[in-house]
Every structure is written in structure tokens, then in C-alpha cells.
Amino acid sequence: MVVRRRDDAISEVIGFVLILALIAIVASLYLTYVVPAQGRDLEIAHMDVVQNQFLDYKTTVDSLWLNNQYNTQISSPFTLGTNPGSTQGSFVNLPLFQPVTSGGTLVVTDNLVTNKDMITITAVDALINELPGYYTPSQWVVQSEPDHLYVNFSTTDISVPDYVIIKPNNTAWEVNLSISPGSSAKTLSITVIKNGNPTVSNLVIQSSIVNKTPTQSPYIIDLADNAYGLKESFAPYPFFMTIVPSSTRITCKPTGYQENQGTYTILNHQMGMLEYRSSNNYWITQNYIYQYGGVFLNQDNGAVVKLLPSITIDTDSLSINSVSYNFADVTLHGITIPGTTPSKVGGSSLVEVLTTLPKPNPTDDPIIYPLASGVPNAKSVKITVTIYRGLDTDTYVRMWKETFDKIKQKSDASAWITTGNSSTEAYMIVKNPNPVSAQPYDISLNTKNNVALVYLSPTSYS
């Protein structure tokens, strides 16, 4: 019997090998192109979610503050990584054919050595007050009804019958403080005139007065004292009170006000931050930051501002004796974040950020006396952010410089604003480009700072 060679089995093996090769080619192409594309899309979508969570967080914290909801804890969810459940529906349901789940880290920083970012606010020749109003050497604007209306009185020569006249712009009343003549023991007296009629005449309010130099404690008179019957005549507000002494021997001005010559520090705080640091496998690394009420994005090509901090600069006007003066209104509402424990949570799960705004305690702030509120109270203002970030310092300095630039662009007082930076600082200076000698104070600075206590509470996907 003749044996013949048959190739049927060989052809079947070759065909099977070719099928396996085709599957391997398709799988390798899928792993090389499709899986990274899916992972990239997932991570882009996740970064959008994180961005919206930071924007929502800023809005929530601002609402908490604006509505005075102090000592009330709020919970804000943050997603650290791509949700594993969202990667289904791939080529086959095997981990090999699914994008690797990315993660991230949420960090609260304040007292870390490498993250002591500071904000400093200074004013040149600032007016400090404890009463509502605005004082210049010759005039005082009373903004609202005061409980007391103190004035200081002193003279360097009691032998001369000097006096001082105090009156508002509406001429509804007038006060005359005088040194009574004709007595060996000189006295300080008050005369009150309302609607042209004397209601109090030469009432002795201080007996046996003595000479006072400008550095000695003056005599203090409360014009709102019920004994003088003036308080009900102060309205309507605001009114402009003029103080005119009869000679240079007399010094008379509202008490509770102090002109701080030179540079006066209004605020000097570590800002702290809430920061998300991504660990993306298929897309660029992105870090989102909430700092001093602003939201920022830091990535490979630099850092940008997403939402500006609550810093506004606008022009306003004030009319004194029918003359209108322009000034810049600078408002800063900032929130600082001290470090808490735990201060870092990593992974791909959900994290609840618990935030509480304690009620402000003025004694916790080194600035005891505030600036005169609602009216011009400084000759210039400088806002400085100092960065301590090691190799990242330059990136964050440029980020804050861009922030100040955007604030300037949005402001109708842009001509008043100068921005700049050094290697470790970004700054913004507000100053009148054309100062008027009759208007010594042309910046109204209003600052409010609060603390947000932030605690991280890890959870899991349901």
C-alpha cells in the first residue's frame, strides 16, 4: 500500500495560529491606542468634576460667611480618583483591557515648613478709629449715629481766653468750648446753640484746667452726653463736623482717632490652603487649590486663576462742602485655613471635606484698632503675597501676579493700581495717580478676615 502525504492537519494548525495572531494584533492595538484614550477621557472628565467641586466649595464657604453661619459645619464631597465602575463596557471585561484607575491626594496645609504662604496688607499714613466716621485736621464726617461723640481739648496757654467752635455742615447746632476769663483758676466751659438759640450757656465742664502740651493727656468732652441735648440733633447722617480753634494755642479734634504715620500693618497672616494633587496615568498632572477665597489650577505649563479671591477695587466719590473728591474703595474678604489632623488623604475614593467657620474673635488678631470704615482712610495700600514653595515658588508667585493683574483689569480704578513681583513675592499697590493736596486720604480700605477650620473625612464608593 502506497502512503501519501496529506496537508489537511497542517493547514488547520496554520489557520488557528493566524487567528491567534490576528487576535493578538487586535488586542495589542486596543491596549496601545484604545485603553489610553479611554483612560485619558476618564481622567479629563474626572478633572472637570474636581474643578466643579472646588468651585462649589468656594461658593459654599462664601455663603456660610455672608449669611453669618458661624460654628456651623458643612460637608463638601471631593472625588480623589476615577470611579472604577465607570470603566466598564470595554473590549472584554478583564482588568487588562481597562484603563488603570487613577488616584489623587487631598491636602490641608498651613504650618508645614515648605508651605507658609503669607498675605500682608499695609497702608501708608492710615487713619485708625473706634468710632464711625472720618477725620481730617479741619473736618470730620460722621457716618452713623454714635453712642458717644468725644472730642479732645487742650491749650498751651490758659491765660488767654481762647475758644473753639464745633458745628456741622447743616448748621442745626453749634458748640463753643472756651477758656473762661477773669478767674485765677481757669475753667473750660461749653455753650450749645440749637437752631440759632442758646440752650446751654457757659456751662463749666472742667474746673482748674492747666496747660497741656500735644503729648499730654487732653480734656475729653462727649458731645453726645444727654446733658447737652445735642444727640437728637445729629441726624440726618452722614454730616460733616467742622472744628475751628481761635488760635494755634488750641488743639481740638475727635478722640478715638489716630493718624498712624508711615507704614501701618493691617493684616499679616499665613493663608493656608486646601489642595488636590492628581496622580493621572494617561493625562497631564493637575493640582487644584483653594487659597484665600480663590480657586487656582497648577499644571505642567504653569498655574492659572479659576475664580478670583474676594478682592475688589472700585472708584467712589465723597462730597465735602459741595466739592466732590474721588477715592478708591479697596475691599478684601479673605479666609485663611490653619492645618488640621489628618491633613492628607490619598487614594481613589470619595473624601468629605468638613468645614467650620468659627465666630471671629477680635482679640485673636494683632490689629486692635481698625481703620476708619466706609470712607477714605489711607494714602496708599499694598497687598503682598509671599510664597514659600521651594522649587515651585516661581510658579505660585506668577500665579498670584496673574491674579492681581486680573483684579486690575476688572477694576474701574485700574489707573490707581500697580502690580509686580519679585522672586518670592507678588504685590499690588493702590495709590492715587494724581493726588490732590486738599484730599490727603484717597484710599478707603475695608478688610475682613476669617478662619476656616477644615477636616478631611475619607469615605468609599457606595
Image (spheres, helix red, strand yellow):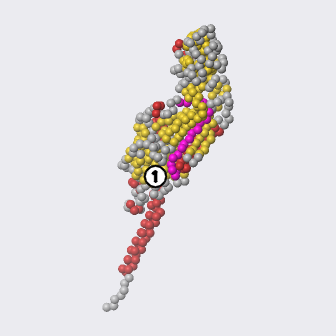
Task: Name the residue at 37% across, 49% down.
Answer: 461
Residue lying farthest to the left in this orientation:
1
Left or right side of 310 for 72: left
Residue range in magenta is 370-392
Q: Residue furthest bottom?
A: 1
The mark total stands at 1
Of 148 and 314, the residue lying toward us: 148
**Residue designated by label 1:** 278
Element class at badge 1 = strand
Q: Residue furthest top?
A: 182
Residue type, label 1: Ser
Q: In which quarter of the image is residue 128?
A: top right
Q: In the image, what residue occupies the spot 53% across and 46% down?
A: 387
Residue 116 visible here: yes
Where residue 453 appears, x then y in whole percent? 43, 39
Determine if residue 198 is in view: no
Q: Position of residue 122 (x, y in %)?
A: 57, 36
